[in-house]
Image (tube, rainbow, N blue to C red):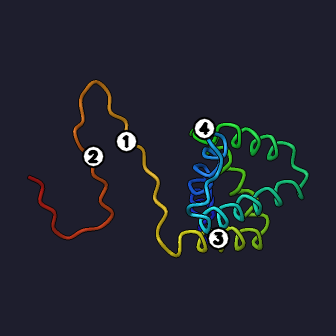
Amino acid sequence: MNFIQIATSAVSIIAPYFAKLIDAGIQKTGENIVDTTANICQSIGNKINSDNDEYAQKTLQRFEEKPSVESRQRALIDILVEKMEDDLEFAEELNQGIENTTKGQDTNQFLINVYGGEVKNIVNIGNSENITFQ
């Protein structure tokens, strides 16, 4: 079981959830995704709170306040990896929550920075054999 991959997937799934909560609240559309994402959030919160780990609680709180900040995402990922290394049952619960949310699809997160130029189109291609751009 790859704890780093699980933690990274979990954070990439819940970050937009918290961002939407902060920005405008959750709409009814995509309710199943919201429910399964909420389950991941609840699993993480339950684990951190049951461990009475003040540092982890503060890290989660800071993430919830600004879920788009990459440094806060990385800090939470580190906490989750530590928790999973100590508790395989939690790792399995988190992994199952991710599978329920993504329905087995890969959860890739990427960042593209463009400085000092103009970009017309950006294309992200997961897998392909032949691609032609014109």
- For the residue marked with disc 4, what is the amino acid? Ser
- Report crowding for label 3: few under 14, some 14 to 19, many 20 or more residues within 10 A (C-alpha): many
Query: Would residue 83 appear left or right of 28 to someone viewing this image?
Result: right
Q: Earlier in the sequence, mark 1 or mark 2?
A: 1
Query: Would residue 90 appear left or right of 18 to someone viewing this image?
Result: right
Q: Earlier in the sequence, mark 4 or mark 1?
A: 4
Q: Earlier in the sequence, mark 1 or mark 3?
A: 3
Q: Earlier in the sequence, mark 3 or mark 2?
A: 3
Q: Are marks 1 and 2 in contact (CB under 8 Å)?
A: yes
Q: Earlier in the sequence, mark 2 or mark 4?
A: 4
Q: Name the residue that disc number 3 marks.
A: 95
- For the residue marked with disc 3, what is the amino acid? Asn
Which-is-in-front pick, marks 3 and 2? 2
Q: How many angstroms separate mark 1 from mark 3 (CA)?
A: 27 Å
Q: Name the residue that disc number 2 marks.
A: 122
Q: Name the residue that disc number 4 marks.
A: 71
Which sits in the foreground, 76 or 88? Answer: 76
Q: Secondary structure at mark 4?
A: helix
